[in-house]
Amino acid sequence: MSTVRQEFEIARRHTPDFGGRTLRLEVVMFALAIAATWATVTGRIPLWAGMVANTVFIYGIYTVVHEAVHANISSRRKHLRWIDTVAGTIACAPLWLFYHQHRRQHMEHHTHTNEDCDPDIYAKGSFPVWIFVKLPAALIQYFNPVQQYRDCLRFGCTRREIVYTFTTFAAYSAALIGALAAGYWKEVLLLWFVPWWVGQTVMLTFFTWTPHHDHTETGRYRNTRVSLFPGDNFLLQGQNYHLIHHMAPSVPYYRYRDVFDEMRPLLEQNNVRIEGIWPDPANEHPPTAHPAE
């Protein structure tokens, strides 16, 4: 028996009028990065501490982007959609992301999860292949304007959104080149690029590879999973409940656990994957699909 109506009702009750907590997260993350960078450059904390703090920043700030592209900051207050755009655009900058393009790309992922046209299908494969081959290749493409233009076309960006994307790309590039030309190459390398690479690696592994591995199932209850382990909700910023996000994208990240707890009996009826921190091969490819799928 289908449980979709019950699931929607649970999600509706946990969708707030306004997602102000995400804005607080953004302020805290930027405060951390600014304070850590200033303290490192002025010699108040060691270089390694600044690198760690900025890695945490890079990892954590994507949650703001993710909430913004789903309009989960303005939430029910549709007249405040501009807040999502502003907050998301600001959060995109240190990640070298482009808000309008990324929003369209991410919506395509939700529409075609684990299908051949899923933008995230590039992550399909074993962990060694992901971490040593596919992920580094994807990260390098962030800095390729030709690839960025192709992605704009692929995901249906409007002409205005393409202009926004490349104006932003030019601004990022000018800031980077300016810092390097001013002699701050060491600060750029160790306080931004290395934290960016490490933070993105951790974020993309736990937001893209582990939730969907082995990237073959497409049903509502099987195209991603739930990952339970000590400290899970805090460490993964709710993305250990990635299934909840795909089932109810309007629910903010800080309410995934509440939705899961209430919805769990319904999910178990539908043969969802509830596992530990790492994907369990034993739960892949069930012998028969549940009728509700």
Image (cartoon, helix red, strand yellow):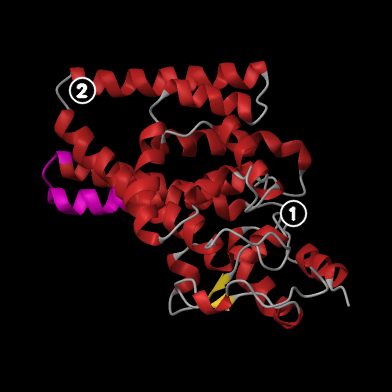
Label 1 neighbour load within 10 Å: few <14, some 14-19, many 20+: few
- How far across and down, in percent of the image, does residue 206 sit? 45, 60
Eyeballing the image, is 282 above or below 83?
A: below
Q: Can I make out residue 32 in this image? A: no
Please give left or right for residue 279 compared with residue 255 in the image: left
Eyeballing the image, is 54 above or below 188?
A: below
Q: What is the C-alpha distance between the residues marked 1 and 2?
A: 44 Å
Q: Amino acid at mark 1?
A: Asp
Please give left or right for residue 236 compared with residue 129 in the image: right
Q: Amino acid at mark 2?
A: Leu
Quadrant holding the C terminus? bottom right
Query: Residue drawn 79% across and 70% down?
Result: 10
| In front: label 1 or label 2 | 2
Q: Which residue is mark 1?
A: 17
Membership of 52 in magenta stretch: yes
Instruction: Report the magenta stretch's main SS.
Output: helix
The span shown in magenta is 41-55
Quadrant hosting residue 264: bottom right
- How far across and down, in percent of the image, does residue 131 sit? 35, 54
Query: Residue drawn 48% across and 36% down?
Result: 92
**What secondary structure is found at the residue carrying circle 2?**
helix
Q: Which residue is mark 2?
A: 180
- Circles 1, 2 touching at the beta carbon (< 8 Å): no
Closest to the observer: 97 or 251? Answer: 97
Sequence-earlier tag: 1 or 2 = 1
Query: Residue drawn 64% across and 65% down?
Result: 243
Quadrant hosting residue 157: top right
- How far across and down, in percent of the image, does residue 79 sit? 77, 37
Membership of 103 in magenta stretch: no
